[in-house]
Amino acid sequence: MEEIVVHGGQRLTGNVHIEGAKNAVLPILAASLLASSGQTHLSNVPVLSDVFTMNNVLKFLNTKIDFDEINKTIDIDASRQLSSEAPFQYVSKMRASIVVMGPLLARLGHAKVAMPGGCAIGSRPIDLHLKGLSALGAEIERHDGYVEATASRLHGAAIYLDFPSVGATQNIMMAATLADGVTTMENVAREPEIVDLANYLNQMGAKVTGAGTETIRIKGVKAMHGCDHGIVQDRIEAGTFMVAAAVTQGNVLVEDAIAEHNKPLISKMREMGVTVTEEPAGIRVIGPEHLKPTSVKTLPHPGFPTDMQPQMTILQLCAQGTSLLTETVFENRFMHLDELRRMNADFKVEGRSVIMYGPTDFNGAQVTATDLRAAAALVIAGLVSRGYTEITNLKYLDRGYFNFHGKLAKLGAEIKRVDIPDGTVYALNPDFAHEAVE
Ligand SMILES: CC(=O)N[C@H]1[C@@H](OP(=O)(O)OP(=O)(O)OC[C@H]2O[C@@H](n3ccc(=O)[nH]c3=O)[C@H](O)[C@@H]2O)O[C@H](CO)[C@@H](O)[C@@H]1O
Ligand SMILES: C=C(OP(=O)(O)O)C(=O)O
């Protein structure tokens, strides 16, 4: 069993490098299915387990994929005859696989994709995806755990999303690229990853305007081709290191982080007394001796991102006084808090809000990650804890962070990742090493 062990109490200092965004590369890989000619070359690709999973989905659909993990590039040839079925074995591994539906339907007139289940953070239905695809002329059928969409030709439509869902915006936008006529999508998601996808689609020959605003307009084209594209920087990875720097009273330059993409986080951190400055090379974060409490509410972009919520609670728990956090995007994203209680955190959950009583005198403990951002939050809590924190269930962390412990170690954290044979009973000795116990 692998775990991360942190010995808390170090200030983080230095520079940290940020990868390309997981939430941009996954839909972009799916969009590559739209290229009926030419080669695609993606750069700044993060080396994450989710990327391997999406590559496997694309391989199953009969594309040719070469992932160069050293240079962080992927070459894709989707010009061959593709299959239109994404089975349960892949979709169950990663919900984001559902975004192959729009491209497959547009390119082949048919897509059969296993219905994604919920996950630890919520039930996560796909009704908005399907409503949009059906407005474009697709027949939707659900049977045997699959959702099947069929259309001899898709046509443009006016679509209003009841909620600015990121995945629904992506799926419908990709399907509309090859539809006859013009599609207008209103109340769409405005995340930077939507803009990155639209830029990529346009390089492939699509005609998409308005990405990043509430309305996207897509003029259908006859065919699309491969192209070169660099993935946008990961604002959530950047934000995670910004919080880690702030909470440890550190001084860290988060290289190439884009301040425009992290405005709500920067604004809250400044309110709490953190010094955040934009420099030519990135964003510098200097943590204060005492953090001020604050209230945060998660919202679709440009509101405070739900993917920064668990990390933000660590900053709030360290503040001198009572803080509030309200999670409006997912119904069940507080599971990390129960683990944090074992580390001495004091809080009360009331419906979709949590009231946190700081400052917390965090104690190291053995804790388990329940999802991706929960894993990052627990590691950050370990950085400010007395003694040792051991975090297990690292498969979640690996979905979205490349070499997280290595990057923190380079910033001065006492942290390591170890593989302990199952069934071993051990104790941590003063040198931070595991010693088997009789
Ligand atoms: C791979 C990826 O990019 N994942 C991100 C994406 O997920 P994802 O695309 O799944 O998130 P959505 O924006 O679709 O979901 C937001 C909310 O809308 C609800 N909903 C969504 C679709 C639908 O058809 N019906 C419906 O009710 C969901 O259950 C959820 O409560 O955006 C989320 C919100 O910023 C982020 O936390 C995820 O990291
Ligand atoms: C919730 C997340 O991802 P996904 O939508 O892939 O589960 C996340 O990145 O925090």
Image (cartoon, rainbow, N blue to C red):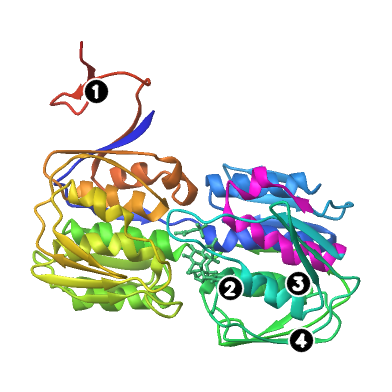
Query: What residue does disc 1 label?
Result: 434
For this view, does 170 lie left or right of residue 15? Answer: right
For this view, does 114 lie left or right of residue 274? Answer: right
Which of the 4 image quadrants contains residue 270?
bottom left
Q: Which amino acid, by three-letter code, is at mark 1?
A: His
Q: Which is more foreground, mark 2 or mark 4?
A: 4
Residues packed near mark 1 inside 10 Å, few (<14), some (14 to 19) or many (20 plus)? some
Query: What residue does disc 3 label?
Result: 175
Callout 2: CB less than 8 Å from ligand 1? no
Question: Is the magenta region chiefly helix, strand or loop?
Answer: helix
Mark 1 or mark 3, earlier in chain? 3
- Image quadrant holding the C terminus, namely top left
Q: Is residue 225 visible?
A: no
Q: Is residue 108 visible?
A: yes
Highlighted magenta segment, given as a residue range: 85-108
Residues packed near mark 4 inside 10 Å, few (<14), some (14 to 19) or many (20 plus)? many
* Whether residue 139 is situated above or below residue 310 in the rendered picture: below
Which disc is residue 359 wearing? none
Query: What residue does disc 2 label?
Result: 194
Q: Position of residue 382 (x, y in %)?
A: 22, 46
Q: Residue at x 82, y 74 (%)?
A: 178
